[in-house]
Amino acid sequence: MQPLRPFAGAVCLALATLAASAHAQSQAQAAPIRIGLPVPLTGPYGAEAKDQVGNAELAVKEFNDAGGLNGRKAELLVRDDKLNPGEAATRALELIEKDHVNFIVGSLSAATQLAVNNVTRQRKVLYISISQSDAINEAADFSRYTFHESLNPHMTTQAVGKYAFTKGARIAFLTADYAYGQEMTRGFTRVANEVGATVVGEIKHPLGATDYSTFLPRLMAMKPDILVFNNFGRDNQISIKQAGDFGLKKSIRFVTPILTYTSRIAAGPGVYQGVVGGSSYYWQIQDSLPSAKALNERYKQTNNGALPSDYGSMAYSAVKSLLTAVKQANTSDTEKVVDQLAKLQYDTYKGPQFYRACDHQSVQSVLVIASKPAPKDANDLFTVLRVAPASTDALRSCAELGHK
């Protein structure tokens, strides 16, 4: 046999390389579309995190039941970030480098989402955050791969503050001393200045506090008309209960930026009676929005008749819109999915939404709600006081965020 000539050898090598590339591409196309979901399953936000997992699973199920992406199914990889930024960064890194996820959705804290975002943007992995944060929209933390499905503190406080604050009102804050609480205080202070209310003081508490007795006399001494609880989860439940037990509710109106379904269920009607707050979603908007009704019905079918919560449905929307972008792009290629998601007009559960170009903030409606006293129906927890429509006017300007 004659030895291969150099040209023939080069042709064989090229054909072998093409075959290997085609095989690798075929394997990539057959592999599941992996979505990482780091959330704080343990800690004071555990109830909300578990709801997010259930709703994200529903969005994945719907995608798979509809045939996936040309037969490719989606897979959800849930990790516990323990409400700790270092843990969140570690879990995100493992999801990317060990589990080879295509995308990441998640985090239920302003601090953990910034840690995850730092990991994903360095590695050019698309990330959709599902917790309140102002910083994630700012130029210093933003990247092409960063999307924010959640409300942010500015848009939340604009809606709630403009409903609850009046000219001449005296406002005091009880604030969880980390990014979420600090950003809520900043937003409410801005609204107070806009409407002519007066901020009479702020008291900060550590995340996960269980005893607020030392703070309450100091808050009462400020003689506020409105006491704003800038905290979340169990912090919110415990502080509002103790403030009510202390007698503050008799002369002071209680307001909180986010009044969650899970907190209201956990603490009961007495604790939250008359408390006003904001929300991204409440199931009763199904009366006017077909997408809300559709989500409620599908969720009930897979969750023993339970209804989706506010933070839970946000996770549904993030995963649903992501997989919609994947399908429209007809690929799981990151760059193409980023381009598709950035221009997506979607209505997954609460009316029209879209991502603003400069910061990828989801522009959406904000509900202002009040807790009902001892409702006859166990699910009939809130009265919707106002719906602030989806508008870029509710956001800080791109220039203010540092975007050119």
Image: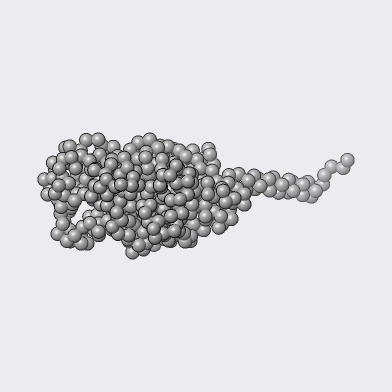
Q: Quadrant of residue 336?
A: bottom right
Which residue is pictured at 47% across the width and 46% down the height?
A: 301
Residue 57, percent across and down?
A: 48, 44
Q: Is residue 210 above or below residue 318?
A: above
Residue 356, percent across and down?
A: 41, 60
Q: Is residue 394 above or below residue 109?
A: below
Which residue is pictured at 51% across the width and 58% down the height?
A: 340
Q: Is residue 80 above or below residue 182?
A: above
Instruction: Please state, as top left, top right, bottom left or bottom right, where the C terminus lies in the image.
Output: bottom left
Q: Is 192 displayed left or right of 7 in the figure?
A: left
Which residue is pictured at 39% across the width and 58% down the height?
A: 287
Q: Specify whether residue 139 is in view.
A: no
Q: Is 382 displayed left or right of 253 in the figure?
A: right
Q: Is 102 displayed left or right of 153 in the figure?
A: right
Q: Specify whether residue 330 is in view.
A: yes
Residue most extreme to the right: 1
Which residue is pictured at 24% across the width and 43% down the height?
A: 271
The colour scheme used here is: one colour
